[in-house]
Image (tube, rainbow, N blue to C red):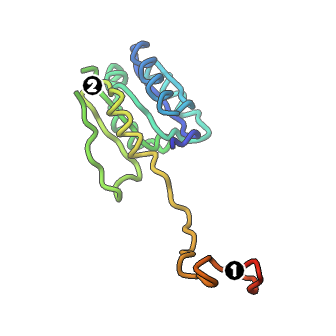
Amino acid sequence: MPNKSMRILIADEHPMQLLQLEKMLNGMGYFRIAPVESFEDLQRLVQSALQPFNLLVGNIDLASHVGVDLDRFCRVNPQIQHALLYESQHLKVPTIPSGQREAVNVSLPKVPDNETLQGFMAIIDMPKVIGQLPDVSRRTSFGGYPRRLGFAPTIFSR
């Protein structure tokens, strides 16, 4: 199940690619998306953000036109947690071990397709285990039914 609170930024100078990426992300259940068409807009949005963006899906060429390395920009910017970058040119998301998933940055040779985008979202939007319930199967009494913890046995415990 997607994390509906993820903040996603899409940066591409081609409006049709922006729309295509936004539709793919919407189809996966992500709706907090901000599309931008220039590096200046991208930079302004990132610098003025009160909360970091969870993901930047961006065209490398967008920044290279103004002499900026978008990959480096994402790595050094604390307002961008993960980045999926592509060039204006079929794709496969590389396997990333669990221990290296703190900040994932991937560069692709062309615009990501639906399968690639789903694979990347599965990497960065993994459910987190907060706690684990105790194993009730070991604490049984009265014919195999779980015993109510903290209460004395009653006729309803059978």
Q: Give the farthest residue toward the bottom.
A: 152
For the C terminus, which image quadrant?
Answer: bottom right
Q: Tell whether 102 sits left or right of 89.
A: right
Q: Residues within 10 Å of mark 2 (few under 14, many from 20)?
A: some
Residue closest to the eye, 95 or 85: 95
Q: Secondary structure at mark 2?
A: loop
Q: Tell whether 95 sits left or right of 9.
A: left
Q: Quadrant of residue 134?
A: bottom right
Q: Secondary structure at mark 1?
A: loop
Q: Residues within 10 Å of mark 1 (few under 14, many from 20)?
A: few
Q: Verify CB contact (< 8 Å) between mark 1 and mark 2.
A: no
Q: Quadrant of residue 93?
A: top left
Q: Tell whether 14 sits left or right of 36.
A: left
The residue under the point 30% across, 55% down is 97
Give how far across and how far down residue 154 sits, in percent: 77, 83
Give how far across and how far down residue 52 sits, in percent: 54, 41
Give the Cα distance between marks 1 and 2: 64 Å
> In the image, which is nearer the foreground, mark 1 or mark 2?
1
Residue closest to the eye, 85 or 2: 2
Q: Which mark is residue 110?
A: 2
Kind of residue at badge 2:
Lys
The residue under the point 57% across, 69% down is 133
**Upstream in sequence: badge 1 or badge 2:** 2
Give how far across and how far down residue 114 sits, in percent: 36, 28
The residue under the point 54% across, 68% down is 132
Q: Quadrant of residue 90?
A: top left
Please name the residue that numbered disc 1 is placed on.
Answer: 158
Residue closest to the eye, 16 or 82: 16
Q: Is residue 3 above or below residue 59?
A: below
Kind of residue at badge 1:
Arg
Q: Is residue 63 above or below residue 4?
A: above
